[in-house]
Amino acid sequence: MENHFDVIIIGGGAAGLTAGIYLSRARVKTLILSEGIIGGQMVLTHAIANYPGVESISGYELADNMKKQAISFGCIIRSNIKITNISVLETIKSVEINGKESVTALSIIFAVGGRSRMIGAPNEEKFKGRGISYCATCDGDFFTDKEIIVVGGGNSALEESVSLTKYAKKVTIVHQFDHFQALQHYIDEAKKRPEISFLMQSKIIEFLGNEKLESVKIQNQVSKDILEMNVDGVFIFIGYIPNTEKFKDMLPLNSNGEIIVDSNMMTQVPGVFAAGDSIAKKYRQVTTAVNDGTIAALSASEYINNLKKEIIGN
């Protein structure tokens, strides 16, 4: 059957592509469906320098390499589509695409990733793409010789701050706590850069401007004093929200909206697995997504092999 697969993978980021590589290489008929571009959050990373065996590579290039590898093994990939319905409770799972086409499979792997979290300050939505960005790789060049702010205190915020010094003449990191949550390596790198300064225990409470962002109001969380700072751009790296809203009635989610899986990436629904940044876990890196995708693929392969034996036996 042309529209029937052994496994359908929902999501084309690091976890989904890895699962596609493993399954297709094992001659498991596999389809990857992605509502966005292939690569997910990975393509937003300017440079990946901690991927084992690779000295340095851009997120886009790594994603493209993974995509080509999956296709070379026979994996079918479809991107920029809209998933309009999913049914997972029966033995044969089904996915409706663009409201008119249906594909089926014995197993589904959810690797839907997440999206950047917003601050929620007034005018943030208004200045998206007009001074406010969530992607240093995408927009860094627009701020050459400009003064910018980076919001956040984790690995991404510190790493991207260093990356942005290639463009901006001044980078101010604004963080609401008195300490960073990043690994010490990223902290040390940021502190060594003369272009980077720090405003700790502070948060942006309003974005100001006319046609584009011109300044921000920053409040100190201890003194409650408010500073208005002229700025050309603000980059926000304060975490992510899992892309699981449309699956909340079919999958077990925790209070953060993350998919609950066991050590084999299995959900409580038979034949349904999950991997990557959308699952409940502590660390989110490309390497951990690759790990999840590998385990999900092997588990799904074992599941469908056993299922086929049962069907033949009956």
Image (cartoon, grey):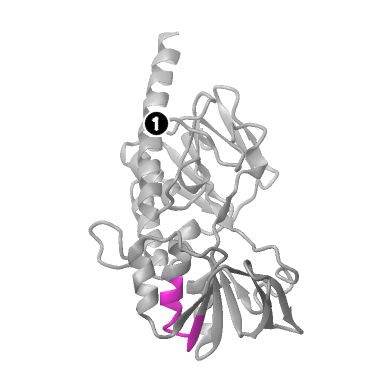
* Label 1 CA crowd tier, 10 Å (few <14, some 14–19, many 20+): some
Q: Is residue 231 above or below residue 75?
A: below
Q: Is residue 90 above or below residue 43?
A: above
- Which residue: 49% across, 59% down? 41
**The stretch drawn in magenta includes residue 167:** yes
Report the residue that reaches farthest toward the bottom.
145
Q: Is residue 29 above or below residue 136?
A: above
- Tell me which amino acid carries mark 1: Asn
- Which residue: 50% across, 57% down? 40
Q: Is residue 84 visible?
A: no
Question: What residue sits right under mark 1 in the picture?
Answer: 264
Q: Is residue 268 left or right of residue 129?
A: left
Q: Is residue 62 visible?
A: yes
Residue 265 found in image quarter: top left
Q: Is residue 265 left or right of residue 294?
A: right
- Which residue: 39% across, 31% down? 264
- Which residue: 66% across, 42% down? 246
**The stretch drawn in magenta includes residue 314:** no
Q: Position of residue 176 (x, y in %)?
A: 57, 65
Residue 142 found in image quarter: bottom right
Judge by depth and name the residue closer to the eye, 308 or 292: 292
Q: Position of residue 77 (x, y in %)?
A: 48, 50
Q: Is residue 203 above or below residue 267?
A: below
Q: Position of residue 2 (x, y in %)?
A: 51, 37
Judge by depth and name the residue closer to the eye, 4 or 53: 53
Report the residue that reaches farthest toward the top.
314
Q: Position of residue 157 (x, y in %)?
A: 48, 67
> Magenta stretch?
160-171
